Image (cartoon, coloured by chain):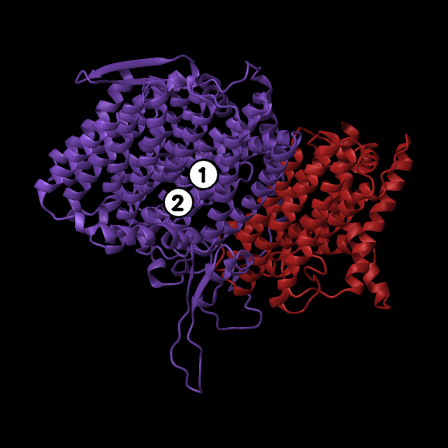
């Protein structure tokens, strides 16, 4: 555990040191980035060794004699640690050239402090062995990320986003606390490992309550509302970490609690599976309707959390039906997708960050043609897009392939499980198709074609520390896509330690699945290389002309005539209109000399719409009635607290 | 193995020939003589001999697009049992891989179209991104049915040897639904009437053709070849289903397979001759029909099995 503590300490020191030397902007960045990256590297190596050498590593500290802070690293924790450290390391490096505004030196230093706290607390969350440690780390994580979201707090929109995130993370934390309360009430122990003694009905309540809490962090529909607001507000490397790994701590919580309770009724697995399908499909549908590139990526996090939950749900159903092969396929696919998503999503957010920094706009329809001047950003973004669309030979395909195989196992089961497996397979297919549509839109409109505004014309991509992490991430998208064996091995190591209720089954057949993927990907490459060689032969000595794009007879095209992302997505959105209502504003063109007109469209998120109508408005009304309690008098508040404790003493 | 590779090469070589059958049938319905049966080879040779003109808006993606979609189709054929003969490669779940690989080809076709900055190509690309989503859902529905019937997940388990016949035995008449659904998918995925009209005059109403507007010379030849191969892939699947019989003799098998392929291609030709293209907003409904058919086939078959 020593290197684990060392890594946490180094990361935190990096954050504090940044604050101490904030007046020397460049020096501050060097200190912070190097300390955080060294800390992350140590942690990453440590986590990898622990993952590949199974065992349980524990550490316990007694805090103020009242409770113990204890940490434990098993396969599941180590797996999440790998993702956390890897993405944080690259995000820290990326931040060096990304945070380049000298005038915001102090703010950048504060941001590094909270960034360090966020990394450390995420690492603590996934290693916490008891509930108190878990909740403490969870709260540090929520609060530090809240301050990171508020980086540009001058804008009212960002403050609103931060507030929304704050409310969601705390309401979520209350649900988690409630489930922990029931847990403690039945066992009298804060340790996760003591969960199996609880009666089944209480187990289900605990799981569902915690699912709401963890789901609000992970961004499960309809609790995802904060995501599309918080991500555009936060700086891009923070978005990368938040979307790439922080929301995955919610997934970790679900799996950890499920494993420690050992509840084998199919109902919870079915709930998770349905939540996954709904998040998956709606997430990508809303993503299609977005105009802001970071909002679009945020909705894709909702989609990918959906895919992960489909995998885990299939795994849980497999466990409850005593079908170990299905269980391992589902969990392995789901967990591998956690790693994969953290890789390609942070890559995409970093790419979006470069685009935003260089062009100054987040609006997709204002960009265009960036691939010509931003080769590295463009190509890595293209790789990320292929990976997130689940296309071979990139990593997204591998995890989805495992989930598919698990889903097909479920087809052999009966009744509900059968129907849900069919639905899961078909939804995965639809999600894949929609994600492809969405990312051809982003790549096509932002990086290809002609620039739609002057800012997008003369861009460069200076800043090697921003480009290097993206190249590394794109490399991993490809490596995992072609040689997934090691990474599937890692995911498999994460499953059995958590004791998911089946006997030991050989893992070799699962690893052999990856051999097929490698074979097929290699075949494709060989054929592609041959085709490219053939192309060279055909073009040898030919005249290659160059001219404008064929305008179908029209000779005066302008860049503004290009197909926009909005129109690209319009017909698909039309199909999903019941769940994605489109608000349009378009004054009609009238008369012989029409005035200038405009078109504005917005896709409403039904979760947001109904959340306001069903939850927020009644709560506001209720609290309005209770306003008389609030006097602003501090004595009275202390009185309230005393009164509450006295009343509680009567009951306990 | 050697024989399988031979058949794979044969499939690639024969695909352009079969596509010419469609033209012949259409010419027959129009009361014309039609082009020679080898027309597609002449076109390909002509295209491969030319140079190219590239738009100043395009990047390397534009050149990569045709190659990726062609390679995807060629790779897909590696897993296809030709005339019921075992394919070159086969593994559990290869069908999922193939569907996603064809998706990769589609991604690059769309990206190449978006590269030109042409509004027409953007329009075609948007349709190309939209319609296959429903096709994929249908294909996975059919895959589920086949999995229930056979417990296997690779193409060879459904279409090699006497397997198609076993599918018919297992499912019975609902298999007709599957055949129709697959035929609809064939039309939609390969941009045939009534989803798309390859011979239409107006760029606004095209899907696949408009996306290739700016490609010329060998690049365009590769696109054409890729689409012949893709059509051949789907057509052989349908062909194996409508002619599920198998004899021990290779020559008879080849004969039966060729005959059923001719039937499928001619059916496409007849469709194109007697129907007009649907209005764009009707197309999703048309493709959704295939999903409904596949779904019903699965539900009915389930009753038979239990």
Q: Quadrant of residue B6?
A: top right
Asked whether residue A563 is in view, the answer is yes
Chain letter, colour red = B
Query: Picture coordinates of residue A127 (x, y %)?
Result: 33, 22
Query: Picture coordinates of residue B51 (x, y %)?
Result: 61, 56
Identify the chain of the residue marked 1, using the numbered disc in the image.
A
Residue located at (82% from left, 38% from top): B168
Q: Quadrant of residue B27?
A: bottom right
Identify the chain of the residue marked 2, using the numbered disc in the image.
A
Q: Is residue B57 left or right of residue B191?
A: left
Q: Callout 2: 10 Å neighbours few (<14), some, many (20+)?
A: many
Look at mark 1 in the image and give the residue it sits on: A305
Chain letter, colour purple = A
Q: Secondary structure at mark 1?
A: helix
Q: Which mark is residue A224?
A: 2
Q: Against A109, is B286 above or below?
A: below
Residue located at (29% from left, 35% from top): A93
Q: Quadrant of residue B3?
A: top right
Asked whether residue A522 is in view, the answer is no
Q: Which mark is residue A131?
A: none
Judging depth in this view, the residue of A415 and A309 nearest the camera is A415
Judging depth in this view, the residue of A644 and A36 nearest the camera is A644
């Amino acid at each position: 555990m020593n290197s684990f503590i060392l890594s946490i300490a180094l990361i935190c020191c990096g954050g504090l040191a940044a604050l101490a030397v904030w007046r020397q902007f460049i020096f501050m960045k060097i200190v912070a980035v190097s300390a955080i990256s060294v800390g992350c590297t140590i942690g990453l190596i440590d986590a990898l060794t622990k993952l590949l050498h199974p065992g349980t590593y524990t550490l316990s500290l007694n805090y103020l004699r009242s409770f113990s802070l204890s940490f434990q690293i098993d396969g599941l924790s180590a797996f999440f640690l790998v993702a956390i450290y890897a993405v944080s390391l690259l995000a820290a490096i990326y931040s060096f050239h990304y945070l380049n505004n000298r005038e915001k030196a102090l703010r950048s230093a504060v941001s590094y402090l909270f960034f360090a706290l966020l990394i450390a607390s995420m690492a603590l969350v996934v290693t916490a062995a008891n509930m108190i440690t878990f909740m403490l780390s969870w709260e540090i994580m929520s609060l530090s990320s809240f301050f990171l979201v508020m980086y540009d707090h001058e804008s009212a929109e960002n403050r609103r986003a931060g507030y929304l995130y704050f409310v969601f993370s705390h309401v979520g934390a209350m649900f988690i606390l409630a489930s922990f309360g029931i847990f403690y009430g039945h066992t009298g122990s804060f340790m996760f490992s003591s969960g199996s003694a609880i009666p089944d009905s209480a187990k289900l309540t605990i799981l569902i309550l915690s699912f709401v809490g963890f789901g609000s962090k992970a961004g499960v529909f309809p609790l995802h509302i904060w995501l599309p607001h918080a991500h555009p507000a936060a700086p891009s490397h923070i978005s990368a970490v938040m979307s790439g790994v922080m929301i995955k701590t919610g997934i970790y919580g679900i799996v950890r609690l499920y494993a420690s309770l050992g509840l084998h009724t199919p109902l919870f697995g079915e709930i998770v599976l349905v939540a996954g399908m709904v998040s998956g499909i709606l997430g990508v549908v809303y993503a299609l309707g977005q105009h802001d590139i970071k909002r679009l990526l945020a909705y894709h996090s909702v989609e990918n959390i959906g895919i992960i939950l489909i995998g885990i749900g299939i795994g849980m159903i497999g466990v409850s039906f005593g079908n170990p092969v299905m269980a391992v396929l589902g969990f392995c696919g789901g967990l591998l997708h956690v790693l994969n998503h953290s890789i390609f999503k942070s890559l995409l957010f970093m790419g979006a960050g470069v685009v935003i920094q260089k062009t100054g706009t987040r609006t997709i329809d204002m960009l265009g043609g960036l691939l010509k001047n931003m080769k590295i950003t463009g190509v890595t973004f293209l790789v990320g897009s292929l990976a997130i669309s689940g296309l071979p030979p990139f990593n997204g395909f591998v995890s989805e392939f495992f989930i598919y195989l698990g889903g097909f196992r479920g087809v052999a089961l009966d009744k509900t499980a059968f129907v849900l497996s069919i639905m899961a397979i078909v939804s995965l297919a639809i999600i894949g198709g929609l994600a492809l549509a969405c990312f051809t839109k982003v790549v096509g409109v932002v990086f290809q074609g002609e620039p739609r505004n002057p800012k997008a014309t003369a861009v460069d991509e200076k800043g090697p520390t921003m480009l290097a992490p993206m190249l590394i991430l794109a490399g991993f998208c490809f490596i995992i896509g072609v040689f997934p064996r090691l990474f599937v091995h890692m995911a498999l190591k994460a499953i059995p330690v958590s004791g998911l209720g089946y006997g030991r089954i050989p893992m070799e057949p699962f690893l052999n699945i990856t051999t097929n993927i490698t074979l097929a990907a290699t075949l494709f490459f060989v054929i592609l290389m041959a085709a490219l060689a053939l192309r060279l032969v055909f073009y040898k000595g030919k005249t290659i002309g160059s001219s404008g794009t064929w305008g179908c007879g029209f000779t005066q095209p302008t860049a503004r005539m290009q197909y926009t992302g909005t129109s690209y997505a319009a017909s698909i959105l039309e199909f999903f209109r019941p769940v994605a209502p489109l608000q349009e504003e378009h004054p009609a063109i009238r008369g012989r000399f029409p005035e200038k007109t405009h078109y504005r469209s917005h896709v409403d998120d039904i979760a947001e719409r109904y959340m306001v109508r069903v939850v927020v408005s009644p709560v506001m009304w209720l609290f309005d009635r209770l306003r008389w309690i609030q006097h602003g008098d501090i004595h009275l508040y202390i009185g309230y607290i005393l009164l509450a404790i006295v009343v509680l003493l009567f009951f306990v | 193995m050697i024989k399988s590779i031979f058949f794979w090469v044969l499939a690639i070589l024969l695909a352009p020939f079969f596509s010419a059958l469609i033209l012949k049938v259409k010419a027959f319905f129009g009361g014309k003589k039609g082009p020679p049966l080898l027309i597609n080879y002449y076109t390909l040779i002509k295209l491969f001999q030319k140079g190219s003109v590239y738009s100043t808006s395009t990047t390397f993606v534009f050149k990569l697009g045709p190659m990726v979609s062609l390679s995807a189709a060629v790779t897909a054929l590696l897993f296809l049992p030709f005339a019921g003969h075992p394919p070159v490669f086969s593994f559990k779940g290869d069908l999922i891989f193939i569907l996603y690989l064809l998706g990769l080809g589609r991604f690059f076709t769309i990206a190449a179209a978006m590269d030109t900055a042409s509004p027409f190509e953007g329009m075609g690309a948007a349709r190309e991104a939209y319609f296959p989503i429903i096709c994929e859902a249908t294909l996975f529905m059919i895959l589920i049915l086949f999995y229930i019937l056979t417990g296997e997940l690779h193409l060879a388990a459904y279409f090699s040897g006497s397997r198609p016949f076993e599918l018919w035995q297992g499912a019975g008449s609902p298999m007709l639904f599957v055949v129709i659904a697959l035929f609809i998918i064939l039309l939609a995925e390969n941009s045939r009437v009534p989803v798309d009209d390859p011979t239409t005059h107006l760029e606004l109403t095209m899907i696949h053709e408009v996306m290739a507007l700016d490609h010329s010379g060998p690049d365009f030849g590769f696109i054409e070849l890729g689409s012949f191969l893709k059509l051949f892939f789907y057509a052989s699947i349908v062909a194996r289903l409508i002619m599920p019989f198998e004899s021990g003799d290779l020559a008879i098998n080849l004969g039966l397979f060729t005959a059923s392929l001719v039937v499928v291609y001619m059916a496409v030709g007849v469709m194109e001759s007697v129907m007009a293209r649907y209005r764009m907003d009707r197309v999703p409904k048309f493709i959704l029909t295939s999903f409904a058919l596949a779904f019903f086939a699965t539900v009915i078959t389930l009753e038979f099995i239990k």
